């Protein structure tokens, strides 16, 4: 089952904030307005009802001490679609609705980011289909208004029913003292969801713990800014009784600040011409060691580089050069992100290549065929070697200048190059290798130009409507090389918010044009955009968007 949860979340925040700004703040204890919100504790936190995905009623009873309960809910959404709502309590800024004293937005490279912590305590009813989840938003800029385009980090403590995060599972990890499934998807921005493998009712954690994992996986960047920290629920069916008992957010650290002990007795064994095996004594920690980072440098001077991680006390260092000296050290880390001092350094010198030093012949007759808007098929004549060819490495660059990049390997004489951009020139070459690590000269270079993406990709739009407003969630599919949608709003309708495109209005006419990061879409790729509009009370009209099919 695939569900576009993150797009929904963006709409939740957009709707909740826009309506909250237009209406007076509500005092505790009860909010039944569809998009009502209130600040508590002198503005320190904001609580939002946010019934964005259904027309069914929901009321929340706000606790001024720092929580809320869903007092009543009549939701019955399909579990293969979006949730009905995201009632939440948060610190930070979303679409201009900011709490006080949060110090957000804050860049993740700021040393103070390491001190940000949050905790939540949940209670669950005996029935319903829902999740209980944190939502952490990051943007490449210190944004206080509009759609965040960096990463959305979700932390699911509980889920009931046949629901799942956006995208697919990409791994498991132990963080904050427990094990989580890791899911990744991209509806127009990166979404990483950590799903607890067993039901949890509370969490006390350092924000950097989960963000570091997302950075290490390549989904986030240290230059991005944390804009808000939220905790709440996504109910599909029912929801009454779901309770945030207590929510905290602090910027002064606390919690586990004790680092693990230093890894001991680092040794290297079994060193060959291109590898060595490292082992060390385990570190200890007041909570628990979650892993080790291995660092290496060539020679005895210069900078060490992180070359891998291990959850145990061994590591196979490969890809070394024959007759070369290397140095290694190891650092332990715990679930809170605390790091030990580095271990002692161990030095190794790889053995001489010896034996086979003859490289394979260069691959011949490199050709490309079947080129589409997003891929091409490469083939070449086999290389020969005095012992035997073990494989080929394929290199690519865009255009006719610049550096070639390793884009894949093959054990045969063909390679399918995918993920290319429409109407773009690429060059490729191939290098053969043998078991001893000898590499051939590069093959000749072949050039291809992908076909135009044109406007052959489809577009769909889903409207989530209520009496005096609606949200349009558009999915633009590739292949496309740039895209624009122009449409007219019905009389009396007003655009009040939008995201993930360049939006312009002229009277009732609206134009959405791609941004730099989502204009070129290969076949199979898509991007999510959307807008919010108001309309006269009782008006049920919706705009027609040429080129987009209503779903």
Image: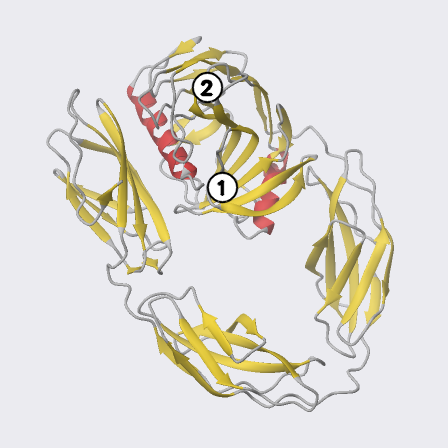
* Residue 85 place in picture, x, y as percent: 40, 25
* Residue 499 place in picture, x, y as percent: 32, 41
In the image, taking residue 47 as reference, residue 200 lies left or right, namely right
In the image, taking residue 488 as reference, residue 168 lies left or right, namely right
Furthest-right residue in this view:
265
Q: What residue did someone put label 1 on?
A: 225
Q: Residues within 10 Å of mark 1 (few under 14, many from 20)?
A: many
Badge 1 or badge 2: first in the primary sequence: 1
Q: CA distance from mark 1 to mark 2?
A: 32 Å
Q: Please name which of the two marks, 1 or 2, marks the residue nearer to the observer.
A: 2
* Residue 190 place in picture, x, y as percent: 46, 46
* Residue 520 place in picture, x, y as percent: 33, 59
Please tell me whether residue 403 is drawn above or below residue 293 in the rendered image. Answer: below
Residue 528 falls in which quadrant of the image? top left
Q: How many marks?
A: 2
Q: Residues within 10 Å of mark 2 (few under 14, many from 20)?
A: many
- In this view, the residue in front, 412 or 529, is 412
Residue name at image x 42 percent, y 64 percent? 419
Please tell me whether residue 346 is drawn above or below residue 130 in the rendered image. Answer: below
Q: What residue did someone put label 2 on?
A: 239
Residue name at image x 35 percent, y 60 percent? 523
Image quadrant containing the C terminus: top left
Please tell me whether residue 382 is drawn above or below residue 530 in the rendered image. Answer: below
């Amino acid at each position: 089952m695939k569900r576009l949860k993150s797009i929904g979340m963006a709409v939740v925040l957009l709707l909740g904030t826009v309506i909250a700004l237009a209406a007076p703040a509500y005092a505790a204890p009860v909010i039944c307005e569809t998009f009502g919100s209130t600040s508590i504790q002198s503005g320190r936190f904001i609580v939002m009802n946010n019934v964005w995905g259904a027309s069914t009623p929901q009321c929340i009873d706000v606790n001024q001490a720092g929580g809320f309960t869903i007092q009543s809910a009549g939701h019955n959404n399909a579990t293969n679609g979006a949730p009905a709502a995201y009632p939440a309590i948060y610190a930070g800024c979303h679409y201009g609705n900011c709490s006080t004293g949060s110090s957000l937005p804050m860049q993740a490279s700021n040393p103070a980011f390491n001190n940000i912590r949050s905790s939540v305590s949940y209670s669950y009813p005996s029935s319903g289909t829902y999740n209980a989840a944190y939502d952490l938003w990051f943007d490449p800029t210190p944004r206080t208004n509009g759609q965040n385009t960096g990463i959305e980090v979700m932390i699911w403590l509980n889920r009931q029913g046949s629901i799942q995060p956006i995208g697919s599972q990409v791994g498991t990890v132990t963080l904050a003292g427990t094990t989580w499934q890791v899911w990744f998807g991209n509806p127009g921005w990166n979404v990483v969801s950590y799903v607890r493998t067993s039901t949890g009712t509370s969490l006390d954690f350092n924000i950097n713990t989960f963000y570091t994992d997302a950075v290490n996986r390549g989904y986030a960047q240290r230059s991005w800014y944390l804009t808000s920290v939220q905790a709440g629920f996504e109910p599909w069916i029912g929801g009454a009784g779901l309770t945030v008992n207590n929510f905290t957010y602090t910027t002064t650290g606390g919690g586990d600040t004790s680092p693990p002990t230093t890894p001991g007795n680092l040794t290297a064994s079994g060193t060959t011409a291109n590898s060595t095996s490292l082992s060390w004594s385990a570190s200890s920690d007041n909570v628990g060691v979650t892993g080790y980072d291995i660092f290496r440098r060539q020679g005895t001077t210069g900078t060490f580089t992180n070359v891998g991680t291990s959850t145990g006390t061994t590591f196979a260092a490969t890809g070394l050069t024959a007759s070369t000296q290397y140095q290694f050290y190891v650092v332990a880390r715990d679930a809170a992100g605390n790091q030990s001092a580095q271990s002692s350094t161990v030095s190794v010198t790889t053995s001489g290549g010896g034996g086979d030093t003859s490289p394979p012949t260069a691959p011949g007759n490199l050709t490309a065929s079947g080129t589409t808007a997003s891929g091409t098929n490469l083939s070449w004549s086999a290389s020969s070697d005095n012992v035997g060819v073990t494989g080929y490495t394929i290199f690519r660059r865009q255009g006719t200048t610049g550096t070639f990049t390793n884009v894949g390997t093959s054990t045969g004489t063909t390679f399918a190059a995918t993920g290319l951009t429409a109407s773009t020139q690429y060059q490729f070459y191939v290098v053969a290798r043998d078991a001893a690590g000898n590499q051939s000269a590069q093959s000749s270079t072949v050039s291809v130009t992908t076909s135009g993406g044109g406007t052959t990709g489809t577009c769909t739009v889903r409207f989530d409507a209520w009496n005096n407003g609606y949200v349009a969630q558009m999915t633009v599919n590739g292949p496309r090389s740039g895209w624009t949608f122009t449409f007219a709003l019905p009389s009396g309708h007003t655009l009040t918010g939008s995201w993930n495109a360049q939006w312009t209005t002229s009277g009732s006419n609206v134009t959405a044009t791609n941004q730099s990061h989502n204009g070129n879409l290969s076949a199979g790729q898509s991007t999510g955009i959307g807008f919010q509009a108001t309309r006269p009370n009782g008006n049920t009209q919706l705009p027609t968007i040429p080129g987009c099919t209503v779903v």
